[in-house]
Image (cartoon, rainbow, N blue to C red):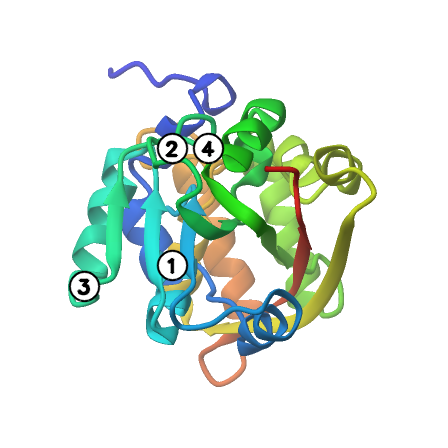
Amino acid sequence: MMSVEPLDELPTAARFSRRAQNYARYRPGYPPALLQLMRAEMGLEPDSVIADIGSGTGILSEMFLRHGNTVYGVEPNSAMRRMAEELLRDYPRFISVAGTAEATTLPAASVDIVTAGQSFHWFDHAQARAEWARILRPGGWVVLVWNIRKRVGSPFLLAYDQLLRRFGTDYEKVEAESSAEGEIQRFFGDEFRAAAFANQQTLDYDGLRGRLLSASYIPLEDDPRFDAMIAELQRTFAEHQENGTVRIEYETRVYYGRIPT
């Protein structure tokens, strides 16, 4: 039998190597209100240059590409990076970069805005702050974004959260670290602002299964718990679906500010 390395012991980037396809297909996008906020608060224009750090399969990058921006998608995981290159191949302003938050490889003072969608909690914050200060032009902005799944609010949301608690390897740890405001305040100091927007996904069973398997803390097919987890997912969907779908609700949280460059 193949040995399975525990998820909570895997290097950060490696956690997503076998999840790239599900991540690209089934993770939620970001609401248009985010782009509106950045236009109003940060002076985002189509000619603004963006470094999207931990860009994964390019979900956040694509929002800016559609806006006309040049986007450097900085991603250390090769499987995620290749997926983004394939999905975003029709955007000539997308530049795929094999780099990390702490060592982007980008030139100094080369970007107007640094973004991180669903990824800031994986970084070494002190090293990332120094690197982002290096690559930002004077007056540039840092934008941290998360789609935070609601755990309560409907019987389905509660049942799905219970499934994640039961089968997720380090679910609570990852969730607690995501968008932890203490870490964000230490990163920015007192000079940051916050906003929140409603977001949601409507998924059929295949979509819900893919959404589940995109999470870094969820066992995959070679884990002995996998079959029991999928059986529980099927029961949960059958009990709570309406017209063949369920709805996952999110709060999109945005933290933004400037750091000395």
Name the one closer to the observer, 176 or 1: 176
**Residue beneath disc 3:** 92
Asked where in the image residue 256 lies, by quadrant, the reply is bottom right
> Mark 2 and 4 residues: CB-CB less than 8 Å, in contact?
yes
**Which residue in the structure is indicated by mark 2?**
104
Query: Taking 154 as reference, is 140 above or below it?
Result: above
| CA separation in Å, label 4 and label 1 | 15 Å
In the image, 192: left or right of 65? right
Would you name the residue on which mark 4 appears? Answer: 101
Q: Is residue 63 above or below residue 106?
A: below
Q: Nearer the viewer, mark 2 or mark 1?
A: 2
Q: Nearer the viewer, residue 87 or 203?
A: 87
Q: Position of residue 234 (x, y in %)?
A: 46, 59
Q: Can residue 206 be seen?
A: no
Task: Name the kind of residue labelled 3 in the image.
Answer: Pro
What type is the residue that disc 4 sits on?
Ala
Q: CA distance from mark 2 to mark 1?
A: 16 Å
For mark 2, does the 10 Å Cα neighbourhood hold few (<14), some (14 to 19), or many (20 or more) residues? many
Q: Given the image, on which type of amino acid does mark 2 rest?
A: Thr
Q: Residue at x 52, y 36 (%)?
A: 132
Instruction: Tell which circle, 4 or 3, labels the residue nearer the N-terminal end.
Output: 3
Residue annotated with mark 1:
61
Q: Secondary structure at mark 2?
A: loop
Q: Relative to 2, say whether 163 is above or below.
A: below
Residue drawn at x 75%, y 58% as measured from the top left: 194
Q: How many marks?
A: 4
- Kind of element beneath mark 3: loop
For the residues labelled 2 and 3, say whether their Cβ atoms are less than 8 Å apart. no
